[in-house]
Amino acid sequence: MSAIPPPRTERQERRYEPAEGLRAHSVELLRHAERLRAGSVALDWKGPQAEAFRWRIEALADRCATAAAGLARSAEQLDAVVRTR
């Protein structure tokens, strides 16, 4: 279900690997949030329990998107530290 980044190669510069890993996980979390939202909308289920379920799915998708944004910010900060060295 989740995409695992490809194995590291000798040609990759080691100083950028952590930031790239954070970016890859950020992208996957955003995709996961999109899939959750799409699945929730596609449900053919009506009633108060369905709405409660959709609300919980939306909250989970929001948490995934928030975590993805945090990972992306962390990657940017790592890149900034590497550039100042």
Image (cartoon, helix red, strand yellow):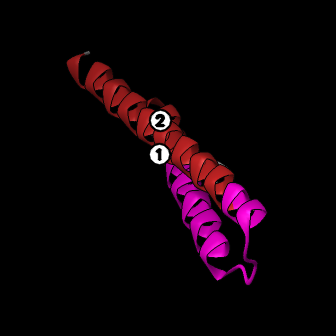
- Magenta region, residue range: 24-53
Q: Position of residue 22 (x, y in %)?
A: 51, 39
Q: Which mark is residue 71?
A: 2
Residue 76 numbered mark, or none: none
Q: Residue at x 65, y 70 (%)?
A: 40
Q: Is residue 8 left or right of residue 45?
A: left
Q: Residue at x 57, y 46 (%)?
A: 64
- The answer to whether mark 2 and mark 1 are in CB contact below 8 A is yes
Instruction: Give 5 or 25, whichever is nearer the viewer.
Output: 25
Mark carried by residue 23: 1
User: Disc 1 marks which amino acid?
Assistant: Arg
Q: Is residue 76 visible?
A: yes
Left-right relation of 3 to 65: right
Q: Secondary structure at mark 2?
A: helix
Q: Residue at x 54, y 66 (%)?
A: 34
- Residue 11 appears at what percent x and percent y? 51, 49
Residue toward you, 76 or 55:
55
